[in-house]
Image: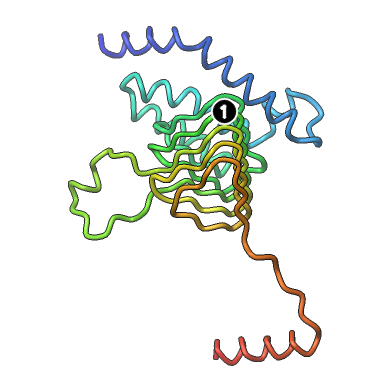
Amino acid sequence: DHATTIVRLFTATLGDIRRLIDSDVEAAFLGDPAARSVDEILVCYPGAIASLHHRIAHELNNLGAPIVARLISEIANERTGIDIHPGAQIGPRFFIDHGTGVVIGETAIIGARVRLYQHVTLGARSPVGATRDDVRHRHARHPIIGDDVVIYAGATILGRVTIGARSTIGGNVWLLSDVPEDSVLVQPEALRLDRKAGLDLRETLLGQSA
């Protein structure tokens, strides 16, 4: 009886799932000039494939079928290299560009029109001194991402931090604290050294490694 109820309730959500998937595909089409058609995105783009699986898995997780939901998310992970926990809440028009290596944790909340690039992690901080029961507790431990945020490749955001709306997080940024709305966070720009300084630095680094 419980399984029948879940199937009935899940069927009632299919219209909403379809609308979310359509919004994700449209966001990818508008966001990637290389895309030739929405069909190409839906069939070939790892981010769209992962989003499609997540939309289904998330509803099943909410309806009390967490194992089935995890199986669906792992199918997407195996195919795309994108790991989205079914519990994550993701708003419409979500776009993962390229996608390989993206990790989104169970209690993450992502707003509307958010774009992620490859190797972005929305993870939890490792609890220091936590007991086994503490680790199993389903407390909110992953980031909250506001509307219209862009997070570039390799960025790592850990813990229950909030990224304000319309912010941009640059590549390879390591972030453990809140970010106000309309912020831009980047790593220091790479330095260009002349030949002598470059060779001196190379010798110093080689000496340290030895």
Residue displayed at 70% across by 69% down = 190
- Give the camera-side residue of 119 and 57: 119
Apparent side of residue 23 relative to residue 110 in the rendered image (left or right):
right
Residue displayed at 23% across by 41% down = 137
127 vs 106: above or below: below
**Residue that numbered label 1 is attached to:** 112
Q: Position of residue 44 (x, y in %)?
A: 69, 33
- Give the camera-side residue of 107 and 42: 107
Q: Position of residue 38 (x, y in %)?
A: 74, 23
Which amino acid lies under the numbered mark 1 shown in the image of this protein? Ala
Q: Position of residue 151 (x, y in %)?
A: 60, 45
- Counting every numbered tag in the picture gives 1
168 vs 59: above or below: below
Indicate the quadrant where residue 167 lies: top right
Apparent side of residue 168 relative to residue 4 in the rendered image (left or right):
right
Indicate the quadrant where residue 108 lies: top left
Residue displayed at 62% across by 31% down = 48
140 vs 18: above or below: below
Residue displayed at 58% across by 15% down = 19
Q: Position of residue 164 (x, y in %)?
A: 52, 40
